[in-house]
């Protein structure tokens, strides 16, 4: 137990130490002024801009948002066609058939929204061509889009021009995602992850039976899967598969990659808005929430199932159901907490087998959607809660709230209120429909409280662009494919539009001089108010459904 805890602490410390230098690098990568990075990347970008006919003019927030929606919608349509015809296309040694319309619809939206919810089994559902041309393409385009939008949002808050989406997208992919993914992909291959276009290996087992072992271009897939907070697995069981996560070192590297971009964005923000202290406050606030939730998950999985423990079984190892022996309950709980906190969705254990409290921690991460968050989109939610905290503090002292020297007025708060409401409406509304409809009920494989958790988890994962699931749910049906597809699309693009509108509105306002009565947002007091706002406004919204699901299940087990 002691050694396990030390290894968790070391993993977190390394992740936190990488956050600041990575954050400063991202700020430099998106600086429109000349930097030392231009020597390496500018020639490549010029060629690509010329080939793509990209104009580098500044855009308004409206043009930026339109560019995001139109570009991403075209990409969804393109990969949908690939999924529908993959059975007739080359690089298909396993003769995988084409996807049916509803599954192709779900998968195309899933990967383009950075969700990577998989209603198919990885090795059996896609050809090599679909994995390489469609899935890998979206695994770069989706986080690139989110990172570009987050940078545009930060520029608007600081009073600078929003920028150009196409320039930001290229820079996100070429200057941030591609170099790190390339290097980490080589490391994964060196650790034993397969990287081949050869068909499945046919072997004779010790019992004399013939077995086919799936393989493929997994190394390149795995690196961007974790770095881009994508999370979709090449294999059906994701990172619990020994080819996708061979050992403790690969598990450690995957956690670092999931953490890398989300933890660095507060430092990017602090650098770009000229208030590094505020960036540190945001980072510390999110870290405190993460550590509280992580502690609950690890302790719960070590305590195990109370009913089993009363029988004297499994009391030392903890809850090993649905977990790999090479990771154990603690590192499985760590991975589950990190993957839901960073909106990644990769798994090294089956979340359906987590204890009620462990499952609730994963659910809360996705419901709050602010505990670091994914590549960009989650950080925008953090700033949204920061503005709400400033607004509430302003009401308490009777002052017009200000954020980064800009007055927060009715227009901004209406947009933020709508954005705040859309997340619970999508989760709770879709869950209610599934629990009421026979088409939704037929997918539930567990009765009573855990069945409610299965449904709520699926839609929380969809709305939060996470992609993990309680895989006991039989979700490959037209009802689930279409409803989760719609939730993923709205959950992704609605907040992008509204928060870009907030940034555009603030960018047009004059900076108000700071006075002795200005409420500071770069000290510990603001951090406490921010954490309180996230729990009061965010967590209490979902408390009733948590009480019906994991909390009730926990009380029954006791």
Image (cartoon, helix red, strand yellow):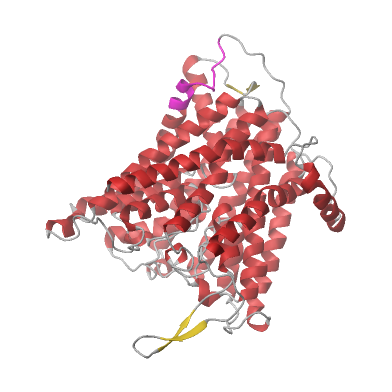
At 32% across and 57% down in the image, what residue appears? 328
* Residue range highlighted in magenta: 517-529
Can you name the residue that lies furthest to the left here? 311
On the rendered structure, is 99 left or right of 445?
right
Q: Nearer the viewer, residue 177 or 36?
A: 36
Q: Residue 189 at x, y = what percent?
A: 56, 64
In this rendering, the count of numbered labels is: 0
Q: Nearer the viewer, residue 531 or 260?
A: 260
Q: Residue 417 at x, y = what percent?
A: 54, 36
**Location of residue 6 (image quadrant):** top left
Can you name the residue that lies furthest to the top here? 516
On the rendered structure, is 425 left or right of 159?
left
Q: Residue 139 at x, y = what percent?
A: 62, 59
Q: Nearer the viewer, residue 9 or 527?
A: 9
Up the image or down, 218 lies above or below 388; here it is below
At 82% across and 55% down in the image, what residue appears? 48
Can you name the residue that lies furthest to the front here? 190
**Location of residue 543 (image quadrant):** top left
**Location of residue 447 (image quadrant):** bottom left
Q: Residue 433 at x, y = what percent?
A: 43, 59
Q: Is residue 133 visible?
A: yes
Q: Nearer the viewer, residue 399 or 3?
A: 3
Up the image or down, 374 lies above or below 104; here it is above
At 66% across and 13% down in the image, what residue appears? 513
Q: Is residue 371 visible?
A: no
On the rendered structure, is 146 left or right of 364?
right
Membership of 490 in magenta stretch: no
Up the image or down, 454 lies above or below 145; here it is below
């Amino acid at each position: 137990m002691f050694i396990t805890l030390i290894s968790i602490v070391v993993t977190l410390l390394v992740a936190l130490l990488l956050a600041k230098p990575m954050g400063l690098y991202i700020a430099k990568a998106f600086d429109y002024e000349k930097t030392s990075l231009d020597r390496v990347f500018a020639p490549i970008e010029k060629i690509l801009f010329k080939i793509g006919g990209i104009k580098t003019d500044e855009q308004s927030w409206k043009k930026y948002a339109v560019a995001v929606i139109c570009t991403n919608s075209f990409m969804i349509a393109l990969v949908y066609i690939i999924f529908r015809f993959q059975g007739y296309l080359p690089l298909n040694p396993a003769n995988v058939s084409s996807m049916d319309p509803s599954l192709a619809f779900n998968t195309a939206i899933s990967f383009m929204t950075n969700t990577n919810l998989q209603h198919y089994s990885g090795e059996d559902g896609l050809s090599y061509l679909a994995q390489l041309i469609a899935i890998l393409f979206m695994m770069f385009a989706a986080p690139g889009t989110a990172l570009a939008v987050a940078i545009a949002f930060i520029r608007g808050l600081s009073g600078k021009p929003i920028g150009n989406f196409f320039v930001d997208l290229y820079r996100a992919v070429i200057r941030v995602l591609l170099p790190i993914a390339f290097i980490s992909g080589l490391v994964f291959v060196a650790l034993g992850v397969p990287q081949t276009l050869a068909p499945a290996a046919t072997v004779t087992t010790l019992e004399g039976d013939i077995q086919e072992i799936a393989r493929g271009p997994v190394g390149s897939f795995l690196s961007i899967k974790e770095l881009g907070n994508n999370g979709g697995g090449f294999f059906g069981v994701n990172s619990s598969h020994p080819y996708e996560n061979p050992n403790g070192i690969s598990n450690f590297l995957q956690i670092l990659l999931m953490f890398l971009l989300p933890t660095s964005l507060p430092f990017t923000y602090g650098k770009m808005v000229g208030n590094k202290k505020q960036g540190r406050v945001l980072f510390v606030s999110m870290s405190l929430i993460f550590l509280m939730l992580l502690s609950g998950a690890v302790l719960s999985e070590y305590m195990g199932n109370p009913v089993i423990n009363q029988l004297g079984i499994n009391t030392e190892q903890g809850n090993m159901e649905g977990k790999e022996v090479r990771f154990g309950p603690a590192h499985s709980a760590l991975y589950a907490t990190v993957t839901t906190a960073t909106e990644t969705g990769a798994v090294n254990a089956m979340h359906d087998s987590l204890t009620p409290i462990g499952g609730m921690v994963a659910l809360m991460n996705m419901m709050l959607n602010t505990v670091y968050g994914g590549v960009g989109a989650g950080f925008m939610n953090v700033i949204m809660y920061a503005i709400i905290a400033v607004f509430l503090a302003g009401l308490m002292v009777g002052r017009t709230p200000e954020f980064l020297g800009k007055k927060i007025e009715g227009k901004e708060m209406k947009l933020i209120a709508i954005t705040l409401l859309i997340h619970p409406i999508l989760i709770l509304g879709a869950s209610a429909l599934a629990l009421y409809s026979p088409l939704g009920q037929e997918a539930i494989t567990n009765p009573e409280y855990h069945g409610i958790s299965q449904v709520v988890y699926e839609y929380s994962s969809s709305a939060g662009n996470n992609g993990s699931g309680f895989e006991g749910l039989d979700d490959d049906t037209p009802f689930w494919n279409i409803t989760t597809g719609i939730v993923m699309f709205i959950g992704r693009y609605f907040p992008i539009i509204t928060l870009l509108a907030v940034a555009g509105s603030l960018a047009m306002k004059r900076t108000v001089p700071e006075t002795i009565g200005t409420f500071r947002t770069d000290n510990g007091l603001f951090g406490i108010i921010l954490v309180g706002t996230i729990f009061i406004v965010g967590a209490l919204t979902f408390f009733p459904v948590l009480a019906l699901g994991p909390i009730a299940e926990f009380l029954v087990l006791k």
